[in-house]
Amino acid sequence: MKKTMERPLNLKHLFLVFLLLFTLVTFGQDEVEAESNADEASTEEIIPSADPVKGKELFNSLCGACHKRYKNAVGPSLHGVTERRDMDWLYKWIVNSQELIKSGDSQAVQLYEEWNKVAMNAFPQLNNQDIDNILAYVEEPKPEPVVAVAQVAAGAEGQGGSGISTEIVLGLLSVVLLILSVILILVNKTLNRFAVANGIPIKADKPKGKPIWVAFAENQFLVLVSIVFLLLAVAWGGYSFLMQVGVDQGYEPIQPIHYSHRIHAGENQIECKYCHSSARVSKHSGIPSLNVCMNCHKQIAEVAPETATEEYSKEFYDNEIQKLYEATGWDTSTQSYTGKTKPVKWVRIHNLPDFVYFNHSQHVTVGGIECQTCHGPVETYEIQKQYAPLTMGWCINCHRESNIKVEGNAYYEKIHEELSKKYDVEELTVAEMGGLECGKCHY
Amino acid sequence: MSSEKKYWKSAEQLEDNSPLVESLEQNEFTDHIPSDEFLGDEENIEGTQTSRRDFLKYVGFSTAAASLAACEGPVVKSIPYVVQPERIIPGVADFYATTIADGFDFASVLVKTREGRPIKIDNNTVSNGLSAGRARVHASVLDLYDIQRIQNPQIENRDVTWTEFFSSLEADLKSNAEKKTYLLTQTFASPSTDKLIKEFQEQYPNVVHIVYDTVSDEAALDAFQAKYGYRALPNYDFSKSEMIVSVGADFLGDWQGGGFSPGYSKSRVPKDGIMSRHIQFEANMSLTGANADKRVPVKPSLQKKIVVEVYNQIVGRVASTNFSDALQNHVDNAITQLKSKSSKSIFVTGLESLEAQAMALEINESLSSEVLNLENPRLIRQGQNSKIKTLISEANAGNVGALMIAGVNPVYSLPNADEFVAALGKINTTVGFSMKKDETASRCKYIAATPHFLESWGDVRFTKKDFSLIQPTIQPLFNTKQFEDCLLKLTGNSSKYYEYVKTNFKSTFDGLSWNKSLHDGSFSIDMELPKTKETFTVDFSSGARKLVSKNNAEGFELTLYTKTSLGDGRQANNPWLQEMPDPITRTSWDNYVTMSKVDAEALGLTNTNVANGALNGNYLTVSLGDKKISKLPVIIQPGQAPGSIGIALGYGKTESIQEEMQVGVNAFPLYNDFDVNQNVTVEAVDGIHEFACVQLHHTMMGRRDIVKETTLEIFNTKDREHWNAVPKVSLNHKEVEVTSPDVDLWDEFDRSVGHHFNLSIDLNSCTGCGACVIACHSENNVPVVGKSEIRKSRDMHWLRIDRYYSSEETILEDYDKKNDISGLTSAINTYGELEVASEEDVQVIFQPVMCQHCNHAPCETVCPVAASAHGRQGQNHMTYNRCVGTRYCANNCPYKVRRFNWFLYNQNDEFDYHMNNDLGRMVLNPDVTVRSRGVMEKCSMCIQKTQKTILDAKREGRVIEDGEFHTACSAACDSGAMSFGDINDKESVVYKKTQDDRMYHLLEYLGTKPNVMYHTKVRNTTEA
């Protein structure tokens, strides 16, 4: 490339473009922040001298299991309760509701009857100030849905500080490069035209020698080497293509319910084996039955606004929870099961062929292997995918490298002692134990 | 001693230089690929339409299509429970104790369920009562998934709801108060059902209950009732016996409900130099006769005389008998031995005659036999088959308004079925309680669809003391209601039968825990039996005269019998049982006439083996009075008494049975007066029948010294060297034992660490019943291949039970005898003796053979892809996904235990058995691969079971105790012939078995070092 020296002018343009972009980005971010600040400021005190922040703590630890602020759960929704009931009555009721019912208080009895005679726990530990705090939290107005945030994020055409994806950056860069090269050619042409017009002699083309490909073709050694390399490359390509047939590493199918491991195992730190409990005792880790989901989701009908991401809105997640209710036949309005169930047909991700016997409990309970070893950082996955290749080579490798967890296991005592003497090692690998024998997994 | 005896599996082998036997001994696969014939025929090749180009096109296309199809994996769906039952963990098996009581088989069983579906039946080892696992009991799990089952109640062939069914039926029953209602049922032996039937009779006083046993034991029941006042069958504890004489009683088969083999086998193992002696007089070669020390083939008419003679000599003279000298000698011998062992001896007979059965009871009383257990008589046969006559005549007279039939199929199984069908037409309301639309149900107005026993509740009283409970192991698959629930509904009782059984249990057995009894499946409690009102006496002298009266009938004496596989035929639609080879004839998918060689030759009947080893035979027509059964194939049966024939019941069903399984001929029409012994005439007819007989398949390539046996005398007096010597090979011109490491080609792998599994098979205890064959089928997803494939020697059984015949005397002894002749009379007698067809006087020996898991396995070294490899724990692993199907391994296996998948046997319409429908596939064991076409398979020593035991121990962090390891076959064997375990555990039973003097390895001289060992059979030939 000649005459690159003449490009500074164009570079200036590029700088200008970038400058423009960055200003837009910063403005976009500022706007978002300003809006969320305004949101928080809108909370106001309902009950004087009460602290809704302390109240929130208490509510979550004591009341949240049965009550929700804006929705009926096991107990009635609490927002607006200070308007419905007298404060003194509330103090008595919350501290010991059964006593109030026994005393024959008409309101209390009526309420008890209305809610299917489910007794509310007594909370003698709460003083009136605590109750005030709780009520203050309860009476906070329902926050408006945060649709605006999502819209802004989308409206900023992907320039939002956190939202710019690599594709967009790359796309922009290539467009800029394209413009650059066009300008370069144009400038070159113009300069040439000037030169011709001004009579400046342009360096004539070199006398044409042998074209490079002819030279290449004549050099037998080079041809041979390149053919060898070509063949090797084809073989390697073919081999790697064939070897990935049936290997579904990275398989990430769309599931009937968008279940996010990120939310459950990541944010909420739910232990894997709480849901996949059979992994401890069975060959299958088990896709949890829906009643396991309902252990929590009876209470959790919607996600917290913080859970939503740019990609998936709160509405999206709430809708997925509704799908669960539909499948289990849970009626949120009556808080009961209708009995009409619709089993969920999940798409199976980890498919071992029929001729392989794999037992989860062997690895999880006996071997003490973390789930993540084979399934990857599941707690970060929004959509579950296959992390490991699940090929035999992958299994065997691990069997060669991993040691057996023998401590405290009476089964291994004798065999470990004898084998470690035989192989003269301290720690035995799975392979030394016989974990490479065909029949251990194929029968 | 043992090796000089001549063993043969089929008569063909007795012929010198039979080319067929030769070729079968030399070739692993009977068919070779006819490539030379095909390619050599130029005309044929040129005449074909497919050019080489076309061929290449097709190959190219199919390769491309296959590889394209392989690139895209199918999307697999997983559907979890909505609400997971607390007990069920996917992937973990649950076990429930329950009971089979179908009227023919009664046993406490343990059912293995996976994800809520029963997949395997095991013996209930905690049960005191009948826990015997027979082949049929193990196979009964497949009946649950039978696509022929009726799925809804029907009225006049129309599916109805139960509400409609009952409203219509109740109206019919009520309008019938004038006439009688008959209730024809199987033996339930159930306290609750009996009580319920009584309640039903109170509600409808016109109800008459008749119990009908398809195969009757009425004579024995009557004899017992006459003597002891109860309607029951005597019970026998054969483990206490030292001398057993049986006249026609197949007590290792289905005689009086079966299940005697555990006790019998116990007495058959020599302990401190003592074992029982068993003499059998019978016509057909039965499983029991095959196990006897001395078997005397005699016709039924002679058997009757023998019973009288034994009675004469032991109890008191009633009638005179006359026998040939030889037979008199045998009978006298038996009697002397019975007397000498007195209380340790037992006499049983299978003759269906009140007098004969009564005599047996008297004989045992005179012997004061301890084997006969009168404290705990059996209640599992209660039939009063003679009353069916009354039912038919009353129906014909128009006195019967309703007939309810439960658990039996009289239209198929009554000898006078046509009369019964005619009578059925005269009855307004007919109800069939049935699992299938069988011959009887299809002729009933109402069909009440009943569930399988694995879907039912109930209680069973096997014997006076032993009870067992039935509990469901799966939700009913179809819209069915069990018979008892229907009765409850009809009596206006709103409770379910479950509640009824439970209430009944609590009121009857106060103090016993319901939950514990249900968990164990069985319980024992001594409760009085009601005495029967009617009493009658047996007139011995006139009875004896009747028994010894000359049989003047022309023709043959027929003995009907039930096979260990099919029994009375209620499980005829079960492909496992159809494919199970009969222990004696080794023939599957058929019933036939068994006939002695002498008679067959006289009638010009032959059995021939065709080129591929399959057996062909001629046909007979058998007539009894005016009844005629045409085209019964004939098998020439060594050991069959001349002048007698045998036919198996239970075949020839035509309704509610898949076409593939409509095999054999129904012999029930010959079962006149419910007596198995009949006089029939036969006539040879044209035609060739093709048997599916496996007796010449998988021979061990003409190698000898396979089964070892000796006599008790030699066993007691001589060293092991004499009767169970370890084979020797020559090393540096010296004889060295083959087990010595010096003669080994291979370096020995150190197996002293961890587990080392061994399976031990005691040929003394093995009765050849075949329960292990079915257990293996069920555990390992072994496919069913069908009759024509069996004929081609392509059976897939991982475990076969070889049956060998041998002559009484060794060949050497024949020579000795010949040399001893001095004088004319002696010469005539001896030559006469020697001329007794060796096939008539035969001994039988059974040998279960599965993969021997050789430590130096010949199959492993020849596999080009290392699909067969050895594990540290002694198992020979077969990796199906590695196998490319060269079949070298099968060629190189000296034991011929490898099986090749010639076809895809699942989801293939060509093999339309249980693996070809969704219902039938529910029985598959999810822990074992279902093999595909083109791979070799074989016994894995149930590695899935040993691995599970090990994993359970690891998970619980404990040491494994002896007795925890099992294979399917060793768990199914109730006679203790098979034991399995870890020989590195020096305390284990199986280790002790390796140290036993009787232990030997199959074809030990090959040096394959198998992990399966056998124990030499010892015969008690001690006379006197």
Image (tube, grey):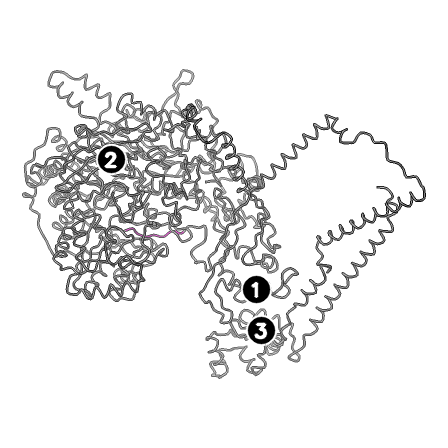
Q: Split into 4 quadrants, where in the image is the C terminus of chain A?
A: top left
| Residue at screen point 66% across, 79% down | A49
* x and y, in percent, of residue B34 in the image: 40, 27
Q: Give the main secondary structure of the magenta stretch.
A: strand
Cα distance between the residues tagged 3 and 2: 82 Å
Dot 1 and dot 3 within a common chain: yes
Question: Disc 2 sits on a residue from what chain?
Answer: B
Between B1020 and B783, the residue placed more toward the observer is B783
Name the N-terminal-most of marks 1 and 3.
Answer: 3
Amino acid type, mark 1: Asn
Name the residue that disc number 3 marks: A70
Name the residue that disc number 1 marks: A319
Between B275 and B825, the residue placed more toward the observer is B825
Q: Which mark is residue B291?
A: 2
Question: Disc 1 sits on a residue from what chain?
Answer: A
Q: In the image, which residues are magenta?
A: B94-100
Between A211 and B737, the residue placed more toward the observer is A211
Between B302 and A217, the residue placed more toward the observer is A217
Q: Residues within 10 Å of mark 3 (few under 14, many from 20)?
A: some
